[in-house]
Amino acid sequence: MDSYDVVVIGSGIGGLVAAGLLARYGRRVLVCESHSLPGGAAHAFQRQGFTFDSGPSFYCGLADPTSCNPLREVLHALGESVEAIPYDPLGHYHFPDRTLAIYGDAERYQASLAEFSPQAAQELKALTQKMLAIYRPLGSIPTLALRADGWLLPTLLQRFPKAMVQLLPQLRGLGRSMGDFVDATVQDPWLRQLIDLECFLLSGMKAHQTVAPEMAFMFGERSESVIDYPIGGSGAIVDALVRGLKRWGGQLRLGTHVEKIWVDGGMAKGVRLKNGERIQAAKVISNATLWDTCNHLLRAEDLPASYGQQALKTPAVDSFMHLHLGIRSEGLENLTIHHVVVNDQNQDITTPGNTCMISIPSVLDPSLAPDGHHVIHTYTLEPWAGWQRDAGYGAKKEAKVQPLIRALQRVIPDICDRITLKLIGTPLTHQRFLRRHQGTYGPAIAAGQGLFPGCKTPIKGLYRVGDSTLPGIGVPAVAASGILCANSLVSPRETAALLDLQTHTGTQH
Ligand SMILES: Cc1cc2nc3c(=O)[nH]c(=O)nc-3n(C[C@H](O)[C@H](O)[C@H](O)COP(=O)(O)OP(=O)(O)OC[C@H]3O[C@@H](n4cnc5c(N)ncnc54)[C@H](O)[C@@H]3O)c2cc1C
């Protein structure tokens, strides 16, 4: 039987970060991934010369040494980096009656808003200041210093006393919702709607449900660092993490589905694969979602009933309709990368099909599409319920992508005449390829309505990483979850030594 210090179930960004860092700390690490491609929701795939991002395309601070992006910190610790192209405006928001350019640069964003409402621009400025007051002290503490045990506070007080003092007045704000900040700062109805939209894009929920630090991080990174896109697409980030893992002796087995976490006497002992093979490990980390871990990877008798019930009661954000397109690009020279289209102003932005996200990364990196073409990923929320692979599946798919086509027509009016490759993904596709409970985007734990369970579990030796452990869905948040988990499995002295090394190599703020 193979034996490791740590087995990680899943090669999502959270799993790869935890695995890479633990390998960096000298642990013998194996990552088992069901899919034939690594990266989970962030994996890339290729068809007919097009390279598609399956999920994320929006990143900040990937190649900026001053950025607080935890992913960049980890890549640096692993001796890796990604090349990235900075750009601004970060995107355009298209409402039925207007289009707004959104900039990372705070002053340009305010100027763009002032064209429609000078009051909104002033209020955005005040809101940005409040967000930066949270972001700056938080951002001056490297995520690489964080851990999820009792050593956290002594470490922070000893190493970052100034930041801790600056954080004191912000402590109340850390637990509040973005909506609380909006209520205190913003009267303009148009800006209130805009902040709701920005929160929804990040967390899948509106401002009153989204925790403020999540938005503070977004405001801070996009205005104080850079918005950049990885050359080669999201897959380049995953490749860098996999290279980093292997460089430090870690292993990745693709096409390796874990059937069960092997628990004996209340302790995780390893995993059992679908093919029956057992792998022994002192520690097991699950990058599967909370629901999948509790429902499928553990037997009911292995978990305290209260934990299992609580986990399964956690509300989930809907899944998605995806439309991946290859299109002819002649005459589209001024196209920009990101667009968000709200199809109907009279409907709630969270209504499936109403808010559509569009990314066209080949405008920045032409290598993602054959000459004379662009690659497009557009998606919108779609509930899981009612989807099945039956005789009506094909027709339902076509009907459900119509809002996405309509949204694309706002950006590229003759889109239908340009399509050379069309791939439609449904909640079933999302669930199947990403092995995520009901194809969900992630947990919908509203601010003040419950706590995220963190990386520890009631089973000794079993830990969790990914988007159902810490507040915040998205690559930076799941990278942070991987760091917290890895650091909690090593001594504070080992973390301090790594931090010292990072500081001396000059790229740690
Ligand atoms: C459409 C879309 C757009 C997004 N856009 C952005 C964006 O622009 N910017 C941003 O920052 N974030 C974005 N996100 C969010 C971000 O991609 C995710 O939050 C993040 O990638 C999730 O990472 P994770 O670590 O939770 O793991 P996941 O991505 O969920 O990966 C888990 C992995 O575990 C594997 N696995 C599960 N069960 C098993 C098992 N039993 N055995 C073996 N392997 C298993 C799965 O196959 C998967 O590879 C987007 C997400 C989506 C879906």
Image (cartoon, helix red, strand yellow):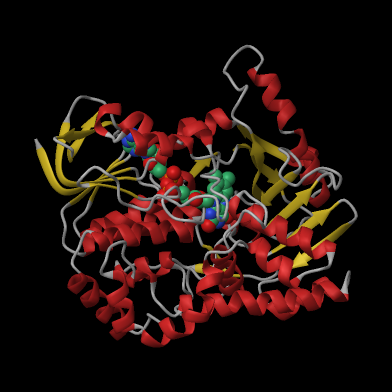
Residue 445 is left or right of residue 77, and the answer is right
In the rendered image, residue 61, in percent from the top left (x then y), is placed at: 51, 71
Point out residue 385 in the picture as x, y percentages from the top left corner. 61, 25
Vertically, is 214 above or below 402?
Answer: below
Name the residue furthest left: 1
For the view shown, which residue lies furthest in the bottom direction? 162
Relative placement, left or right, of 108 versus 59 is right
**Is residue 54 shown to the viewer in this render?**
no
Q: Position of residue 75 (x, y in %)?
A: 36, 66
From the viewer's side, name the closer residue of 421 and 227.
227
Whether residue 111 is situated above or below residue 279 in the rendered picture? below
Seen at 47% across and 76% down, the residue is 139
Name the image quarter holding residue 35.
top left
Residue 285 visible within the image: yes
Q: Number of callouts in the render?
A: 0
Work out whether residue 214 or residue 185 is closer to the camera in this orientation and state it.
Answer: 185
Compared to residue 135, the image places residue 371 above or below, namely above
Q: Image quadrant for the C terminus?
A: bottom left
Quadrant of the image containing the N terminus:
top left
Please tell me which residue lies in front, 256 or 19: 19
Q: Residue at x 65, y 42 (%)?
A: 326
Q: Is residue 100 above or below residue 66?
A: above
Q: Left or right: where does residue 286 sit relative to residue 135?
A: left
At x 77% / y 50%, what residue is drawn?
A: 341
Which x, y percent locates residue 344? 84, 44
